[in-house]
Amino acid sequence: MANEQSNSANPNVDLKYRRKKNAEEMKHQVISFTLMIFFTLLAFAAVGIEGFSHWFIKPVILLLAVVQVIFQLYYFMHMKHKGHGTIALFLFSGLAVGLITVLVFLTIVWI
Amino acid sequence: MQTDERFTDATWPASPEKATLEGKNKYLGFWLFLGGETVLFASLFATYLALKDKVPNGDAALAKDLFELPLTFVATMLLLTSSLTSVYAMYHMKNNHFKQMQAWLVITVALGFGFLGLEIYEFNHYVHEFHHTFTSSAFGSAFYTLVGFHGGHVAFGLVWIISLMVRNAGRGLNLYNAPKFFVASLYWHFIDVVWVFIFTVVYLMGMVG
């Protein structure tokens, strides 16, 4: 985790640069939010518009959800930044156990 | 570095949430918790998928009878937007703008309450119109456990963010509370991550059949 402290002799120059960097990052966040809303609209439209088969809709909306969650995790939750290796380990271990549970309940459990 | 030290815009660190050892540990520990939450919600999803539409007789409501597109859509938009407003709050936190951060958090909390209100209306509607209750079927139990657990997380998140805002209202930003605000916003995003799967797997796939 890089701890970006001021290196400049004049903190105001550094401040200007950081403000600009923060504003730029915020712009990326808004873009990823727009994309997330777009994916959501697509998913709702796929279900709302009559005529698509189940076999088409289900995988497509699941894929849209996965893409949206990747945006959420990597942009909104900052996983794209440096120093998130341990964090990724935590999340993906949780995800691995979770997905195996879902797989098991969908295949070898029957009621 | 003193955690209650007063900062100017120029001396405020670029990543205030990770500027202290406590902040760093909190950040890492919180992600460990989120890994555990992932397992918890995945198990609830697995249970729901296994018990979906498992009802005792032909009169009981199934997923495709219950769910409606407009309500789910509005709830989804409220929660997704609240995720963006909390990003705005953290943007102002990094710029040492305490008032703007609080303002965006107020909007986030308001959207969260909107979402929770819709969920309460929805559950009430299912219980009274469809007699779809927690104990009416295995489907009912699995549905209310999964969606209710998420709703409980939203309620907890609201209490959390409001407490932080009230507690630090007169204090302003420092390196003691910056990690607290940051971690609460991470939690809020995680609630959104879970909701993306709920609206897709439970509602949209439920309506498809």
Image (cartoon, coloured by chain):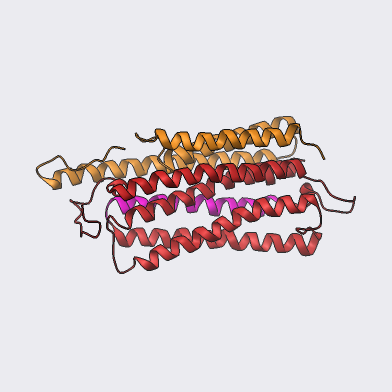
Q: Which chain is red?
A: B
Magenta span contains residue B140: no
In the picture, measured across the screen, residue A18 lies left or right of residue A60, that is: left
Q: Of residues B126 and B142, which is closer to you in this image? A: B142
Examine the image and state in which quarter residue B144 appears: bottom right
- Residue at the outermost left position: A9
Residue B102, percent from left and from top: 37, 62
Quadrant for residue B104, please give it: bottom left
As displayed, is residue B149 above or below residue A104? below
Q: B53 or A85: which is nearer to us?
A: A85
Q: Does residue B90 show up magenta in the picture?
A: yes
- Looking at the rendering, the stretch of residues picked out in magenta corresponds to B68-96
List x then y, in percent, for residue A26: 36, 44
Which residue is located at x 56 percent, y 51 percent?
Answer: B77
Q: Nearer the viewer, residue B112 or A85?
A: A85
| Image location of residue B58, percent across then percent down | 90, 50
Q: Name the residue: 47% across, 43% down.
A: B32
Could you tell me residue B153's position as x and y percent? 56, 55
Q: Residue B106 vs residue B156: left or right?
A: left
Picture colour for chain A: orange
Asked if residue A48 shows in the view, the reply is no
| Chief SS of the magenta region | helix
The image shows residue A56, relative to residue B140, as above or below, that is above
Figure quadrant of the C terminus of chain B: top right
Q: Is residue B208 visible?
A: yes
Q: Residue at x 48, y 48 (%)?
A: B189
